[in-house]
Image: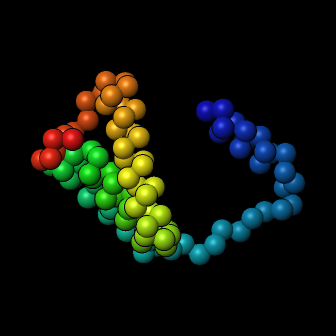
Amino acid sequence: MILSFIVIADSVRSSEDSVQEMGKMNWAKIVLVLLSLLFYAFFLERLGFVLTTFVLLSFLLGWSERTNWARSLEVASATALVSYAIFELWLKIRLPKGIFGF
């Protein structure tokens, strides 16, 4: 909420003459992200949190954002494992285990 207030205050302070025009919408990318989130929701219980999150983030970073695949795999694995450690181990929130048991 604090960051939202900062963004709102910054937009109010900026000159109203400088209106930024939105670029052309990339509908293919929007649909692709929405479909990947639907697949994430569908496979979350079946494959488990860590694997499904890793696949989703690898796909979104590698294909959608066109980053280096090695870098996207690093970020995806680190994010999946750190979020698992935070939610499952530290906060004791039960996440879907999936077929592999993690």
Q: Judge whether residue 52 can be spotted in this image.
A: yes
Q: Is 70 or 11 nearer to us in this picture? A: 70
- Vertical side of 87 occupied by 82: above or below: below
User: Residue drawn 40% across and 61% down?
Assistant: 73
Q: Quadrant of residue 63?
A: bottom left
User: Residue drawn 72% across and 42% down?
Assistant: 8
Residue sticking out furthest to the left: 99
Q: Is 98 or 78 nearer to us in this picture? A: 78
Q: Quadrant of residue 94?
A: top left
Colour mapping: rainbow
Locate residue 40 relative to residue 97 in the image: left or right: right
Measured from the top left, where is residue 54 in percent x and y?
Answer: 33, 54
Please state, as top left, top right, bottom left or bottom right, where the C terminus lies in the image: top left
Measured from the top left, where is residue 11 in percent x and y?
Answer: 77, 48
Q: Is 81 or 41 nearer to us in this picture? A: 81
User: Residue drawn 84% across and 51% down?
Assistant: 14
Locate residue 45 relative to residue 91 in the image: left or right: left
Measured from the top left, where is residue 89 in percent x and y?
Answer: 33, 28
User: Residue drawn 66% across and 68% down?
Assistant: 22
- Vertical side of 50 occupied by 85: above or below: above
Locate residue 6 relative to residue 18 in the image: left or right: left
Please state, as top left, top right, bottom left or bottom right, where the N terminus lies in the image: top right
Locate residue 96 relative to residue 34 in the image: left or right: left
